[in-house]
């Protein structure tokens, strides 16, 4: 019985940990596409912003939802329409 209660407490804790977004799913920015490479990425409130550089051009900003789908506010028509998703959503 004690083992069951301990297990129940651990499961409850982990569920609460996930609910606050510690392990939230997010879009994973591709490291490059074509002649464009990733400069920075950041996920906030379920939206991932991937900023890319292209030699001799302005930065390209691609915004994705937590399912990896491109959002309309992206700055470039050539942003990948769909990217992979995963965990470990960070800014950097």
Image (tube, grey):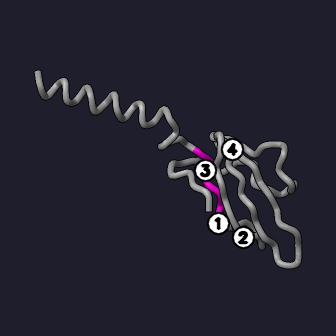
Secondary structure of the residue carrying tag 3 is loop
- Between 10 and 37, the one lying in front of the other is 10
State the residue at coordinates (36%, 35%): 14
In the displayed structure, does residue 17 sit left or right of residue 79? left
Image depth: mark 1 or mark 4 in front: 4
Q: Are marks 2 and 1 in contact (CB under 8 Å)?
A: yes
Q: Are marks 1 and 3 in contact (CB under 8 Å)?
A: no
* Mark 1 or mark 3, earlier in chain: 1
State the residue at coordinates (45%, 36%): 18
Q: Provide residue 25's location: percent of width, then percent of height.
A: 55, 42
> Neighbour class for label 1 at 10 Å: few (<14), some, many (≥20)?
few
Secondary structure of the residue carrying tag 1 is loop
* Mark 1 or mark 4, earlier in chain: 1
Mark number displayed over residue 31: 1
State the residue at coordinates (72%, 53%): 49
Q: Residue furthest top?
A: 1
Image depth: mark 2 or mark 3 in front: 2
Q: Provide residue 75's location: percent of width, then percent of height.
A: 86, 54
Q: Are marks 3 and 4 in contact (CB under 8 Å)?
A: no
Distance from the alpha carbon under mark 1 to that under mark 3: 12 Å
* Mark 2 or mark 1, earlier in chain: 1
- Residue that badge 3 annotates: 84
State the residue at coordinates (83%, 78%): 55
């Amino acid at each position: 019985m004690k083992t069951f209660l301990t297990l129940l407490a651990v499961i409850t804790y982990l569920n609460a940990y996930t609910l606050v977004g510690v392990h939230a799913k997010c879009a994973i920015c591709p490291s490059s596409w074509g002649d464009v490479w990733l400069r920075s990425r950041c996920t906030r409130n379920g939206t991932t912003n991937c900023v890319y550089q292209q030699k001799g051009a302005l930065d390209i900003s691609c915004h994705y939802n937590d399912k990896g789908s491109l959002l309309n506010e992206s700055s470039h028509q050539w942003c990948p329409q769909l990217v992979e998703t995963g965990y470990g959503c960070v800014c950097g």
